[in-house]
Amino acid sequence: MKIKDGFVLRHVMDSDIVMDVTGKFSGVVKLNATSAEIWSAAAEGMSERDIAARLSEEYGISAEKAAGDVEKFCAAMREQGFFE
């Protein structure tokens, strides 16, 4: 999984937002804490499977629940054009 060039996560006034530093996308996307964690892990080059395992362990949720949440978030990011 790879984040497209130009999209970055920033922490602004107690909120995590994704913005396009190239200026091609004029909006911002506000992320909750878990989504920001998934984004950051993707930026590190982690796979969806590894991110889900990390979330499962960190939050004490089932591997299936974590995998479903990660898959749903990543699919939405691909649909919006943020992830390749």
Image (spheres, rainbow, N blue to C red):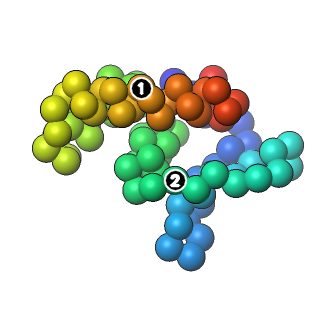
Q: Please name the residue shown 36% across and 33% down the image.
A: 69
Q: Position of residue 31 (x, y in %)?
A: 52, 53
Q: Determine whether, in the image, residue 10 is placed left or right of residue 24.
A: left
Query: Is residue 67 shown to the viewer in this render?
Result: yes
Q: Which is nearer the eye, 52 or 29? A: 29
The secondary structure type at the circle numbered 1 is helix
Q: Name the residue under label 2.
A: 31
Q: Please name the residue shown 30% across and 27% down the image.
A: 67
Residue that lies at the very extreme toward the bottom in this rendered image: 13
N-term mark: 1 or 2: 2
Is residue 19 depicted above or below 43 in this figure? below
The secondary structure type at the circle numbered 2 is strand
Q: Which is nearer the eye, 77 or 11? A: 77
Q: Determine whether, in the image, residue 66 is placed left or right of residue 11.
A: left
**Which amino acid type is marked by label 1?**
Glu
Q: Which is nearer the eye, 61 or 53? A: 61
Query: Is residue 45 shown to the viewer in this render?
Result: no
Q: How far apart are marks 1 and 2 (CA)?
A: 16 Å
Q: Mark 1 points at which residue?
A: 71
Q: Please name the residue shown 22% across and 25% down the image.
A: 64
Q: Where is residue 42 in the image (x, y as percent from the top left)?
A: 48, 36
Disc number placed over residue 55 in the picture, else none: none
Q: Where is residue 55 in the image (x, y as percent from the top left)?
A: 26, 40
Q: Please name the residue shown 56% across and 76% down the image.
A: 13
**Which amino acid type is marked by label 2?**
Leu
Q: Determine whether, in the image, residue 59 is placed left or right of residue 41.
A: left
Q: Where is residue 4 in the image (x, y as percent from the top left)?
A: 67, 32
Is residue 37 depicted above or below 14 in this figure? above
Label 2 packing within 10 angstroms: few (<14), some (14-19), many (20+): some
Q: Which is nearer the eye, 16 or 2? A: 16
